[in-house]
Image (spheres, helix red, strand yellow):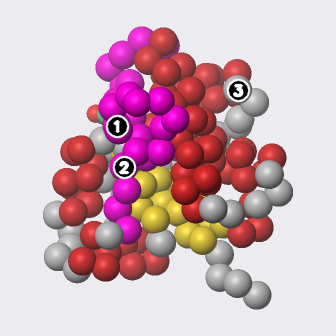
Amino acid sequence: MKDKIKVLFICLGNICRSPAAQGAFENLLKKRNLDHMFEVDSCGTSGYHDGELPDPRTRKVALQHGIQLTHKSRKLQSKDLHYFDYLIVMDNNNYNDVLSLTNDEALINKIYKFGKFRSDKGPDIVPDPYYGSEKDFEKVQELVENCSIGFLDYLGV
Ligand code: 4NP
């Protein structure tokens, strides 16, 4: 049996963007009957919200898109860089925070910006909605669904 493809979505607090990305990607995998091929998780570069469910605004918008989020926030650990095959960050701060944990080129090469997989020509980041409006959360939801499709296409599975 083939090894699962291990994907870790990473943002700052692990209560808005990365759990939304995890939920959207898992939902897409289920729809395409590919969930058995993947192990998916998310985390934050900070431990600010350790153990918390996603932000109520993130959960509300995800639910409107048919996705229930039950992940509990956790902080990124050095061992995650070894364990996961794809370290998918949401913005440049996340990218630099993950980068600061290693000098190993093999690990650095696992870091991707999720926005790189979007289908339009917009910026390659998923913007932080935490201090924004409900509209910003809706935009994040739409973007992570769009990037999930692009990422799966990239993987070619
Ligand atoms: P996230 O959003 O990184 O997408 O989960 C944030 C959540 C919390 C904070 C900042 C961003 N915070 O400062 O507590």
Q: Nearer the viewer, residue 74 or 132?
A: 132
**Is residue 146 shown above or below 29?**
above
The kind of residue on which mark 1 rests is: Ile
Q: Which circle, 1 or 3, is nearer the viewer?
A: 1
> What is the quadrant of the N terminus in the image?
bottom right
Distance CA(mark 3)–CA(mark 2): 23 Å
Image coords of residue 75 (percent x, y): 37, 57
Image coords of residue 149 (percent x, y): 62, 44
* Disc 1 residue crowd, few under 14, some 14–19, many 20+, Cα 10 Å: some
Distance CA(mark 1)–CA(mark 3): 21 Å
Residue that label 1 marks:
125
Q: Determine whether label 2 and label 1 are within 8 Å by CB.
A: yes
Q: Is residue 45 left or right of residue 138?
A: left
The kind of residue on which mark 2 rests is: Lys
The question of residue 118 being in magenta is answered with yes
Q: Quadrant of ligand 1?
A: top left
Q: Residue furthest bottom?
A: 1
> What is the quadrant of the C terminus in the image?
bottom right
The kind of residue on which mark 3 rests is: His
Residue that label 2 marks:
113
Q: Is residue 4 left or right of residue 46?
A: right
Residue at horizontal 47 percent and vertical 72 percent from the top: 84
Magenta segment range? 110-134
Q: Earlier in the sequence, mark 3 or mark 2?
A: 3
* Disc 3 residue crowd, few under 14, some 14–19, many 20+, Cα 10 Å: some
Distance CA(mark 2)–CA(mark 1): 7 Å
Q: Is residue 142 left or right of residue 34?
A: left
Residue 65's label in the rendered image is 3
Residue at horizontal 47 percent and vertical 30 percent from the top: 120
